[in-house]
Image: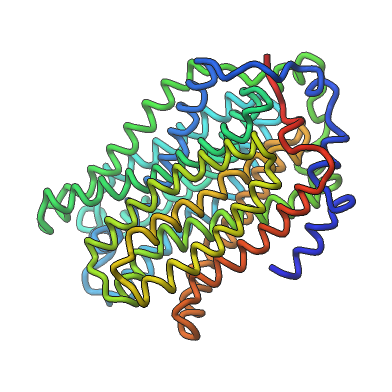
Amino acid sequence: MLGVLPYLLDVEGARPYAAHERRRSALEARMPTSRPLNRSDVKTLALSALGGALEFYDFVVFVFFAAVIGKLFFPAEIPEWLRRLQTFGLFAAGYLARPLGGIVLAHFGDRLGRKRMFTLSIFLMSVPTLAMGLLPTWQMVGIWAPILLLLLRVAKGAAIGGEVPGAWVFVSEHVPERHVGFACGTLTGGLTFGILLGSLVAAGLNASFGPEELQAWAWRLPFLIGGGFGLLSVRLRRWLHETPVFAELQARKALARELPLRRVFRDHRKAVVLSMFFTWVISAGIVVVILMAPTLLQTLHGIAPATAMIAGSVAIVFLTAGCVGSGWLADRFGAGRTILVGCLLLSAACLAFFAGVRHRPDWLFPLYALAGLATGAVGAMPSVMVRVFPAPVRFSGLSFSYNLAYAIFGGLTPIAVSLLLELDPLAPGAYVALLGLGGAAVGLALASGGKKLTEGAQPTS
């Protein structure tokens, strides 16, 4: 990470965002920026957040029911460790498909329209989720059971690759320029809300049904619920409109004339690195603080599973609030300053959480809530990520950066933290804290970039 920072801090004069501001397209500069959020903006934000929530909902549900899925989709005679490895291999396959799916959807998003791909991505996410709840098991069709599950996971992963970057681009090009931070932060908060929703559904099913019922049929319910939820979102998204920025590009015949990703590689490599680094920070905060911490609390500190899960749910609520709040602060004080202060708080809060719980388990809830709130600093980062790419290649640039970084760092973070735990029980907190310091350094560079970061998104009338 430290080797990357000099490159980030020297993006066209240590001011990647400000440099891009100086190169803003004339059509974005002409569009009015001062109107307040209206009902249409709120509807756009709400419908956009639904798809992101579905992504993390599916993530949590699959993990919670991994043991049941392993027993149903693989032969009973294989060792337990092999069944578990194969089950999580199927899970990982979906994430490996994200970069390719994101590139394809983003390409057409830059060429054919944001709305078309935005609606298509959630449809392609919903159908595999629904189909998972209808799959035959190993006992019914043998080897075809895991093969079908693998195909559905890959299809869903490819669709997810276009959903989150597409949602950030979609809302940022719809709302007034001075509310882009709030819009992206709210959308990021919607992603984390999906974790809470998945946890609540899984906990409710485990409380309502016994092991035999779960293995017989009840395991299908969360996937059917998620698929139905997604298809409803598809129908609701029909009422959304194409972004004014893309419509203007189309009207002026200013769309990218060459392959959008080729232009990204040629002209915006430093913006890719910056966006990948921010994605690393985002994935580390969510994976370590929200997804791994409840299990670490049980194994390292002997905290009861029910207590750890409740504390984790409280942290998710504070994380969601933190994402929305940091987005609002980015609009008011600039994204650079918000990221600088927020990442410093993230580093301090994560170290305090993992060290404090070790010595004072009775402080679990306030320390975890504080860590969740501080992790919400990542909500200010997407507003920068959408702005460092010009409109004609924005979707492709952001999608490639986000999905490649998430596939690499999102997958390696649990492994790295697990290995570091052998050296120091405070390793999870130190890992996030180190990335937080890197984020603060980049925030400082952005804050000193000359122009306020709240200037120059893609305002609308």
- Residue found at x 62% / y 27%: 114
Q: Give the percent coordinates (x, y) of residue 159.
A: 51, 41
Which image quarter is the N terminus in?
Answer: bottom right
- Residue found at x 73% / y 56%: 442
For residue 104, say whether it is visible: yes
Q: In the displayed image of the protein, which residue is found farthest to the bottom?
A: 423
Q: Is residue 186 above or below residue 298?
A: above
Q: Is residue 235 above or below residue 56?
A: above
Q: Nearer the viewer, residue 17 or 66?
A: 17
Residue 445 shown left or right of residue 108 in the figure: right
- Residue found at x 51% / y 54%: 375
Q: Give the percent coordinates (x, y) of residue 248.
A: 75, 17
Q: Nearer the viewer, residue 213 or 347?
A: 347
**Which quadrant holds residue 73?**
bottom left
Q: Give the percent coordinates (x, y) of residue 209.
A: 11, 51
Residue 315 shown left or right of residue 310 in the figure: right
- Residue found at x 61% / y 19%: 242
Q: How many marks?
A: 0
Q: Give the percent coordinates (x, y) of residue 236.
A: 42, 21
Q: Nearer the viewer, residue 325 or 41?
A: 325
State the colouring used for the structure image: rainbow
Which image quarter is the C terminus in?
Answer: top right
Residue 247 shown left or right of residue 321 in the figure: right
For residue 246, say whether it is visible: no
